[in-house]
Image (cartoon, grey):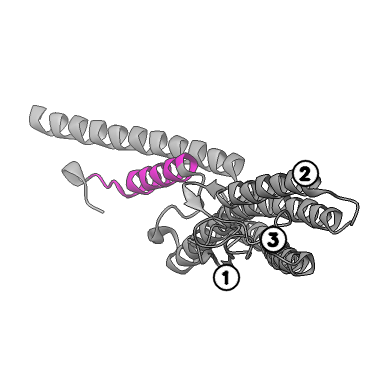
Amino acid sequence: MAGIGGVRFSPLNSANTGVNNSIRKISTGSNRPSASYGASEYAIARRMTSNIGAYEQSIKNTQNSNAMLNTAAGAINNTVESLTTLRENIMNAMNGTNNSSDLATIQKGIGQTISQINENASVSYNGQRLIDGSNPGSTIAGSFGYETVQFGNMTAEGLGLSDSEGNPTVNVSDGSTPLSSALDVVDKALNDALDQATSIGAAQQGLNYQEANYTTASENLQASESQIDDLDIAAEVVKLKSNQAQEQLAMFGIKAQMNMKRDTVSNLLGQ
């Protein structure tokens, strides 16, 4: 390679390129910071990095979805407890030892329990109502595909415990509702609540498996990507120092050649 005054700079350029390459590698921690360092290996490593990012986001999605389902499951568990109490109240009312005053007291407790069930159904997560009938389900996105978790209507009306006006369909105080029929209504509501609890529990179990699979896939892919792209910093620092030394020697050689040519020209002019 030609240089100034016929002095060739090829060793200097080579050493300078080596210095720049080492500095770029060390600064990025990557053995292939661009495609110019190995096109196929660079493409494979970047594709792996992209997939790792997708797995990591999938893990976050499953964790956030599990938190949402935990919120819904907690409210449904409270509803199951409320329905269990409601069933006990009706069975108490079926006891022939109760007078009208006792039945009125039991009915008041039933009304309070039904109100609590509506409170349970109003639970929300991140601004979204979950089990009041307004949310048909939630889609969970992941690298292995999509899954939709269905939500039911866990309000008193949705469970058949009240009409559209909010009036209880279970009345033990005035004889308008046969107690056996009232018990059937509550039993159906309890079964519906338990079905919803079971569905959410199964979805959570599936999410836990998915999270474990995403974590395993991410860890294995990170190990493979590390083999391809991670830089041996210590070895590259040694290479950098070697290239810097060669760069200095090349500069010294160029200066020596230029001084020699200048002296030669001066001697010729002095003759």
Q: Is residue 17 magenta?
A: yes
Q: Secondary structure at mark 3?
A: helix
Question: Which type of secondary structure does the marked residue at label 1 adopt?
Answer: strand
Q: Is 207 placed above or below 147 here?
A: above
| Residue 70 % position (x, y) | 66, 51
Tag 1 residue: 147
Task: Return the residue at label 3.
Answer: 204
Q: Nearer the viewer, residue 84 or 103?
A: 103
For mark 2, give the secondary structure: helix
Q: Looking at the figure, which quarter contains the C terminus?
A: top left
Point 63% across, 64% down: residue: 159
Estimate the spatial distance between the alpha carbons at disc 1 and disc 3, rounded to whole Å: 12 Å
Quarter containing the N terminus = bottom left
Earlier along the polypeptide chain: callout 1 or callout 3?
1
- Pointer 2 residue: 101
Cβ atoms under marks 1 and 2 closer than 8 Å: no
The x, y position of residue 111, in whole percent, is 66, 48
Q: Are marks 2 and 3 in contact (CB under 8 Å)?
A: no
- Residue range corresponding to the magenta coloring: 7-27
Residue 91 % position (x, y): 85, 58
Say whether residue 104 is left or right of residue 3: right
Q: What secondary structure do most residues of the magenta stretch adopt?
A: helix
Mark 1: give few (<14), some (14-19) or many (20+) Cα within 10 Å: some
Residue 255 falls inside the magenta stretch: no
C-alpha separation, residue under disc 2 versus residue under disc 3 = 46 Å
